[in-house]
Image (cartoon, helix red, strand yellow):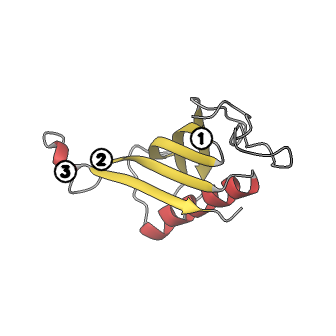
Amino acid sequence: MHNKGAHNPDSTDDDPEYPNVFGGVEPEDIFIKEFPTAREPLVFRGEVEIDGSTLHLKDIGIFPAQSRRASASISELRGIFDQLAEQARSEGFNKLRITGVRVSGVSFDPTNINSARRIDITWDLGN
């Protein structure tokens, strides 16, 4: 992992400095943001990891903001991820990686680790 705000050792003096925070959150801290949806707001949380120009939001969680249970459509989740990608792009990142384990839904069995589904999505942000 690169040091926060460090230049790539192979870069020239003309290269811009890599971003060292995301949404005001430093690496190894938790980024939390609420997103409105058709049913109720959802809260996204993920640990920030920065490796050069790649932002990694890891061990993510998406939770209802107001109730104990909520469901979100695929399009609502895609909307949250698209907004995060746009924010990462606007803050100077070239890639966004989101990882975690989905443990909710009708297929989840807490006694069977294989019923959880790993999430690992990477976007090329084109910066």
Label 2 secondary element: loop
Mark nearer the N terminus (2 vs 3): 2
* Residue 41 visible somewhere in the drawing: no
**In front: 110, or 41?**
110
Tell me if 16 is positioned left or right of 77 in this view: right
Q: Residues within 10 Å of mark 3 (few under 14, many from 20)?
A: some
Q: Which mark is residue 115?
A: 3
Image quadrant holding the C terminus, namely: bottom right
Residue 113 rendering spot, x and y as whole percentages: 18, 42
What is the residue that sits farthest to the left in this orientation?
Answer: 111
Give SS at disc 1. Answer: strand
Residue 107, horizontal then vertical, whole percent: 20, 56
Q: Earlier in the sequence, mark 3 or mark 1?
A: 1
Q: Amino acid at mark 3?
A: Ser
Q: How many marks?
A: 3
Q: Residue at x 64, y 62 (%)?
A: 125
